[in-house]
Amino acid sequence: MKGTQLGEFEELVLLVVGVLFPEAYGLNIREEIINQTKRKVAIGAVHSALSRLDEKGFLESELAEGTHERGGRRKRLFKITASGKQALERNHELRNSLFNQIPEMALKIV
Amino acid sequence: MGLQPTYEPPKTAVKLLSLVCKKNLFEEIEGDLYEYYQGQREEKSKRMANLHYWFHMLNFIRPFAIKKLGQNSNTIIMYRSYFKFAWRGMLRQKLQTSFHLLGLIVAFCVCGFIYSHIKYESSYDSFLDNADDIYRVAWMNQNPQTRTPHPMAQALVDDFPEVIDAVSISPIYGSGLTKATVLLKNEKSNITFDEPNGYFVDSTFFDVFSFKPIHGNVKEALQTTWGIILTKSVAEKYFGEANPVGERLSFNGMEDMLEVAAVVEDTPKNSHFRFNFLISYVSLKSLQFNDPWMSWDDFGHFNYLKLAPGTDAKAFEAKIPDWAPKYLGWDEENVEALKTGENKFELQPIQSIHLHSNIRWELEANGSYSYLLIYGISALFILLISIINFVNLNTAKAAQRLKEVGVKKTLGAYKSQVFSQFIFEALFTTFLALALSFVAMYMLETPFNQLVNGNISVADLYQTDVILVLLSIAIVTAFVSAIYPSLYLNSFEAGQILKGLKTTKLGGSSVRNGLLAVQFVAAILMISGSIIIKNQISFLKNKDLGFKQENLLVVEVDDFQGDLEVMKTSIQKSAGVLDVSLVSNVPGGQFNQHPIYAANNPSLRVDAAEMFIDNDLATTLSLNIEAGRMLNKEFSADSSGTAFVLNKTAIRELSLEDPIGKQLNWVNNEQLVKGTIVGVVKDFNYNSLHVPVRPMIMMVPTSFGYNYLVAKVSPANLKETILSVESNFKEVYPEGGFSYRFLDDQIERLYLEETRTLKLTTLLSAISIFLACGGLLGIISIVIKQRVKEISIRKIMGASASQILWLMNFKYLLIAGVSLLIAVPVSVYFMKDWLSNFTYQTGIDPLAYVLTAIAVLFLIGFTITLISMKTVKSNPVNALRSE
């Protein structure tokens, strides 16, 4: 099994999957990321991240019904798993804790 | 519900995606892309949308989405297993594998190097624009020469429409036609060099030769009097990086005489002449009015023509004899010789000069076609030996793989599949060898260049034709080596093999022995050839030249304007200097020549090389005096240049009997010098041994004439001697550059090509015999495994070790014997042919063949004995019990 670290982009994708619950799938995840972060993201990059998250066990997925605008192709809907939630929390706490440790002085200078 | 029509994404992209994308991911990915495409089409043009679709589609080519190769393909899985088999098989027999690879790598490397070398040597002057249409006019009589009259160039352009441009050039010669160096000086920054390779060129130089200008207008530069054109690196020596056009240089002490008019690119290495600077004929003509050198009488210029594209040079050449006489003003006899073709003006294609022209006054030492041929043939032989090794070993190995093939066939393999496996394995080896040989060539490039003094670059091999040839050699080798084993192994029934078919005999031994004989023939040809080449070359190097070439220090004094006698006396004083002599030319260099004839027999004229000498030449060079005396400036006739010393060849060709005291006329261009023969010297080889000794005349010069000071030095304390000579030189000529060399080094340089050939042929013949023996070793080691039982039984019946060894050796020694019988006559024939290129030949020494035979037979016997010893010595019971 691969490591269970969350990369920066992976974390972003994981968060967006949560935001879009229960309708998160490749294309709308990408749109949401573009809208919220103004980053340019290729569809392939999102899928790549999704597949990595899936492998790490942070996501689970099922195929939904095909729709007309997809030419009848089914889409894969993603949900955060328990361990995905834990990983997000861990990252969040780590950030907060590190942020709180920064002395006031350091921030003033900036 | 009314469904909106949807847009179809570009078909090719979808198709491509379906090809490379994993099946389980394909639907969602394609769906996402489809949906995305719909959105894009609403907003943008179809083209832009397609472009975006493509972009995102290609973005899916990432590891997570791409199909694993061979997931579902039988063929791919099968080849992957072939690959595995091949790899494991190679690892199992490390020795054999490394020999296989090594042999092929060596052969590919040798071929690559030799190919590059040949390619380089034949690339001379091909960098010129219109190189195919540029010719040099050579004068072919009994003693052919590269030089023809100056006015001829312009006259050819005027009279023949097919001659577009023509140019005369001439190296800057000192007296006696030695290439002079010129002292160039930048007065401002006080930078002086004794600059070699200066040329006088006519104003049309750049019409014919497309050397690339960097600064200045080259065309105008050649029209200006006392303008000088420098090459880039020379310009940088004097002026640094800045544009030097308009700067001034001093010429042999004449202050600021020359103005830098242009700078051109350095002459490429593969040019048959290389210049450092150019001075226009315009400058020359402004000085010397009515100089006979510029007339039709003096065959003293290198004339190059540019013909119209597509002109038949031979047809054009045939027009010259009818045209030339009106300018030449010759007597009937000479015109007749021209018209009959006895003497003729020949057009030498410029690209063939380096390899095919080797006549008098070549601008630089040219290469030799016959040596290239030797290299090429040697390389092909080595390739042949190596390919045969590969084929032979593969066929001999076939029996070892019987079981493997049996199992495969039972599991349902077709014959073609067995075949393709063998092909695959062979291809794998040859391609691996090919790839490794390129690595090896990169590593060996510098050592090889140093060894043979070459200029090759492996990067030149990356060309379509070379790559194609190499690939096809690799493929053909692989196929040939795989055909026999697969046919042989396919010929058995699977069941039969598994039931325990024992093949005691290796098939195909007659083919294999035949190929072995071919290898031996090639190796014998190469070894005997290289011995004969070595004999010839050491013969040339050790031949008595008629003078002592050792310990002769040659100091250049051609730019010294003062009294040379003072210089001579000064150097004579140096420690370790025994004798000193002033000369115009030194042996091993080039000599000017003019006709001479006996006063009582004016019709018999011979061209004689001339050498200006002083009193001490005979002692310094240890020349042998045949009759009369050497020159002595005490005699007034000697010092006025009317006393001559000739060599024996000159006396013979003039058919003079009792020559001392005879009147002789020396035709120095227009000027006729009448003098007396006072001495005759034995012939000495003042040219390279590639040519015979020609007539020579020696005299004391009336004015300037000495270029060199030759000092015989004692071999002890050479360093101190040179320092002492230098300080004495500087005392007399403080502003001069002291440059010296040893005469034997200079003479050695005449045989550069021979030295290179010797090194290469020795190396290549060693490689060839090593490869041939290695191949033999491989075969024997397989053969002997098949014969273990036979040997054991023989031992039990009482055969001695030597009897068994003889049994093993006999067949192969017989093959070697047959090969010798074939190879020796072939070798004798070709080596005789090669030797006939030389004026001085050693002849074919039968010992060369005896040595070759002994070496080959010994190496073969040694190889076989070495490999069979273990089996022969082992306890026969062990081998027999295992049944």
Image: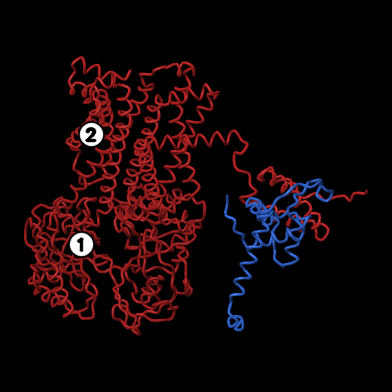
Q: Colour of chain A?
A: blue
Residue at 16% from the left image edge and 78% from the top image edge: B563
Q: To which chain does the residue with label 2 belong?
A: B
Task: Identify the residue under disc 2.
Answer: B859
Q: Which residue is at the front of the view, B522 or B27?
A: B27
Asked where in the image residue B104 lies, by quadrant, the reply is: top left
Residue type, mark 2 in image: Leu
What scheme was used to colour the molecule? by chain
Establish if B632 lies above or below B242.
above
Q: Earlier in the sequence, mark 2 or mark 1?
A: 1
Residue B832 drawn at (x, y percent): 25, 38
Q: Decide: marks 2, 1 in contact (CB < 8 A)? A: no
Residue B321 visible in the shown view: no
Residue B597 drawn at (x, y percent): 19, 57
Residue at 25% from the left image edge and 34% from the top image edge: B828
Residue B773 visible in the shown view: yes
Disc number for residue B32:
none
Q: Residue furthest top?
A: B797
- Determine if marks 2 and 1 fall on one subunit: yes
Q: How many marks?
A: 2
B88 displayed left or right of B331: right
Label 1: how many Cα within 10 Å (few below 14, some 14–19, many 20+): many
Q: Which residue is at the front of the view, B756 or B749?
A: B756
From the image, which quarter does the C terminus of chain B lie in?
A: top left
Q: Secondary structure at mark 1?
A: strand
Q: Colour of chain B?
A: red
Task: Identify the residue under disc 1.
Answer: B610
Residue B781 drawn at (x, y percent): 31, 29
Q: To which chain does the residue with label 1 belong?
A: B
Residue at 42% from the left image edge and 64% from the top image edge: B167
